[in-house]
Amino acid sequence: MPFFGNTKSFLALACLVAAPSLASAVEISKTVDVSVYQVCASAAECASTGPVGNSYYAAETNKIWAQAGISVTFSFVSQIVNSYYYNLSDNTVGVATFDDLYNSVFPGLARVNHTSVAMFLINDYDGAYGVGFSGAGGLVMSMSAISSFDCGGQVGCTGRIDTLAHELGHNFGLVPEYFPDYAGAADPGHSINPNDLMAGGGIRNVPTTLADVNPDGLGLDRLPQSHIDYARQSSLLRDVAVTAVPEPSTYALLGLGLAAITAVRRRRAA
């Protein structure tokens, strides 16, 4: 029986059929690590760290920036127990600003740190959801506003889940003068497309859950190619090794190929 007798030829055929194919998603080739500081008014009263099981909205942040081949990791550094920094403002006399808070940890580096990202979880920032330095590595998450956002009563809502991803966009240098889809003086620093990640908080269509994020579902928090190309040049990013990931169907084919080879060998032994 020549078919069963030509084991080497069959092995080559099985390996050819089961060769891994690259996943269709954008390969992750850049990464940024976010150093996390949680601000507390007292030992018993601290800003939230986000939903249970999804601290800092890490899942949403990573899915959004995966469009650009960028992964986001987090390193919790410390709590800052100081009621002066629990709430921040740019407009209220006697209330600390973000620069004050940042400089308390990194003296003199506010707005000029281009090598690392520090995220401060605070209670409130003038009612805003967040703020990030433009082109430098610092951002604030206003956790009371983010956590209380109810998505218009939609089921599954855990808050304003794309705030961190948006502020990271500012850190990566996505600022108005570089892109024709930005609003200019009407809303400095933001896109006019409500489905884009860098649209202003007043017009941006916010995903209720991870399933709404582009390229799935409603396609929200989209990153246009021009934004991707610019963000990937940020000095805040680091290169990572690219690993080819087989599609699930590839594993199935590989399993069938190995099973067939095993059957051939058993048949020959018999």
Image (spheres, helix red, strand yellow):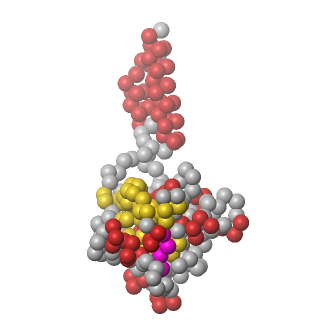
Q: Position of residue 268 (x, y in %)?
A: 44, 13
Q: Residue furthest top?
A: 270
Q: Position of residue 145 (x, y in %)?
A: 58, 70
Asked if the magenta segment contains residue 118, the reply would be no
Q: Which residues are magenta?
A: 86-90
Please name the residue shown 39% across and 57% down the image. 78
Please name the residue shown 31% across and 59% down the image. 238
Please name the residue shown 70% across and 64% down the image. 154
Specify the quadrant of the image occupied by residue 176.
bottom left
* 258 over 154 or under it: above or below: above
Q: Position of residue 191 (x, y in %)?
A: 50, 80
Q: Nearer the viewer, residue 2 or 87?
A: 87
Q: Position of residue 86 (x, y in %)?
A: 48, 69
Inspect this view and state whether residue 59 appears.
no
* 2 over 57 or under it: above or below: above
- Dominant secondary-structure state across the stretch colored magenta: loop
* 81 over 99 or under it: above or below: above
Inspect this view and state whether residue 24 appears.
yes
Specify the quadrant of the image occupied by residue 66.
bottom left
Please name the residue shown 48% across and 14% down the image. 267
Q: Nearer the viewer, residue 91 or 115?
A: 91
